[in-house]
Image: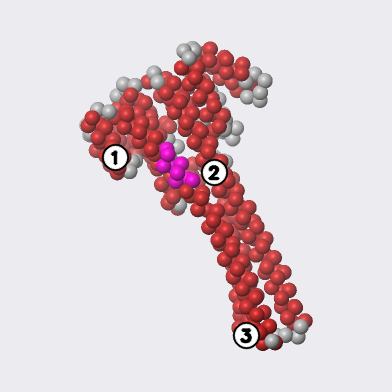
């Protein structure tokens, strides 16, 4: 499978590209004519060379999928889905689906970027605030009390020391978390991206759930197009692993294909694979019984994509208030460790 290039076309541009291709096909334009027109549209932009190369490749090969594979700036998922669209004679439908898919992916990426950036900034702020409290505020209070000729009793000293201990503990925890977060962000931009994502799926249940729904949406989307185009189920399943980035999910699909070749039923193989939730498993079984597998698969793909987006939005919405609450509790604990002894001293003077 094609490797991810750091210069990969962004999701919003991919959505626009897919929409443009779908419109060209809907208008009855030949694919190579449409690509030539698209290349002329981008002639005076920084993408001119990329679209000119794509246009020449389409003219040479007659295939959009083959042309996309020649340039690793185009994602492999786009090329694989285009091939399926071409083989099924439903390229326009595939491009419309891809346009919606990349539009959603763009929104998700912006939300995730915001969710990552905000905690990192807040973490740095937390480090700075706690460090100032420990190194400046607590010693200042001690010097003020000593200068006033007032002592702090044993309980007061204990509370101040506890405040300092809490502050240092928070500093260490936040620093470790920040280093881990930065390390993950850096690794996701390298060839170790797949391994990092697999690790996150294992240790972070919400991400595993989201990834499962994304895989279910991709599997059902491809099967819908292939079955709707009249392709045998075995051949459809053989193409599905090419569009999956999750090795575990791809392995489950291959196991399904093997069971079908051994004479097993699609419904039984699907249930044993655990690719879909039980509700969708039943929906697909009903679709098989009614002979409407492609329709049901398309519906399942749409639902899974929407749920994945909702899960990501929900996760993002929880991160920010949680960090704010943690920061407030830590700062409050440190300030109380200073203010309570001060209040006791003032009360004893009055």
Residue 335 drawn at (x, y percent) = 64, 71
Dot 2 surroundings within 10 Å: few (below 14), some, or many (20 or more)?
Answer: some
**Which residue position is annotated with label 2?**
111
3 and 1 marks in contact (CB < 8 Å):
no
Residue 74 locus on image (x, y percent): 54, 28
Q: Is residue 163 left or right of residue 210?
A: right
Which residue in the structure is indicated by mark 1? 281
Prevalent SS, magenta region: helix
Determine whether, in the image, residue 203 is placed left or right of residue 149. Answer: left
Please determine whether, in this image, residue 6 is positioned above or below residue 174: above
- When asked about the image quadrant of residue 337, the answer is bottom right
Residue drawn at x 62%, y 70% as measured from the top left: 334
Which sits in the foreground, 82 or 150?
150
Q: Which residues are magenta?
A: 305-313
Q: Is 294 above or below relative to 39?
A: below
Instruction: Report the Cα–Cα distance between label 1 and label 2.
Output: 30 Å
User: Which residue carries the number 3 mark?
Assistant: 154
Q: Is residue 32 above or below residue 323?
A: above
Quick check: marks 2 and 3 in contact, CB under 8 Å? no
């Amino acid at each position: 499978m094609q490797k991810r290039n750091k210069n990969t076309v962004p999701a919003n541009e991919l959505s626009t590209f897919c929409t443009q291709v779908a419109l060209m096909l809907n208008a009855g334009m030949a694919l190579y004519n449409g690509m030539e027109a698209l290349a002329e549209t981008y002639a005076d932009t920084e993408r001119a060379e990329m679209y000119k190369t794509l246009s020449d490749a389409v003219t040479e090969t007659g295939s959009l999928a083959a042309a996309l594979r020649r340039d690793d700036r185009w994602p492999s998922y786009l090329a694989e889905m285009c091939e399926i669209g071409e083989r099924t004679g439903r390229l326009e439908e595939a491009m419309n689906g891809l346009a919606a898919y990349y539009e959603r992916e763009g929104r998700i990426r912006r939300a995730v970027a915001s969710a990552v950036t905000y905690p990192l900034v807040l973490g740095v702020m937390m480090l700075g605030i706690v460090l100032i409290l420990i190194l400046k505020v607590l010693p200042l209070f001690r010097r003020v009390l000593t200068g006033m000729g007032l002592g702090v009793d044993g309980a007061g000293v204990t509370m101040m020391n506890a405040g300092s201990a809490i502050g240092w503990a928070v500093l260490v925890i936040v620093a470790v978390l920040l280093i881990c977060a930065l390390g993950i962000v850096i690794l996701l931009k390298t060839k170790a991206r797949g391994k990092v994502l697999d690790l996150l799926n294992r240790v972070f249940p919400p991400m595993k759930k989201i990834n499962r729904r994304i895989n279910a949406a991709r599997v059902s989307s491809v099967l819908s197009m292939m079955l709707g185009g009249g392709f045998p189920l075995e051949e459809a399943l053989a193409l599905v692993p090419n569009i999956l980035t999750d090795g575990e999910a791809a392995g489950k699909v291959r196991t399904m294909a093997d069971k079908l070749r051994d004479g097993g039923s699609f419904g039984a193989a699907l249930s044993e694979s655990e690719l879909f939730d039980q509700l969708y498993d039943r929906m697909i079984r009903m679709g098989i019984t009614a002979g409407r597998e492609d329709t049901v698969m398309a519906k399942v793909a749409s639902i899974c994509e929407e749920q994945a987006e909702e899960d990501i939005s929900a996760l993002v919405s929880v991160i920010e208030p949680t960090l704010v609450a943690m920061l407030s509790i830590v700062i409050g604990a440190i300030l109380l460790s200073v203010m309570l002894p001060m209040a006791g001293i003032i009360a004893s003077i009055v």
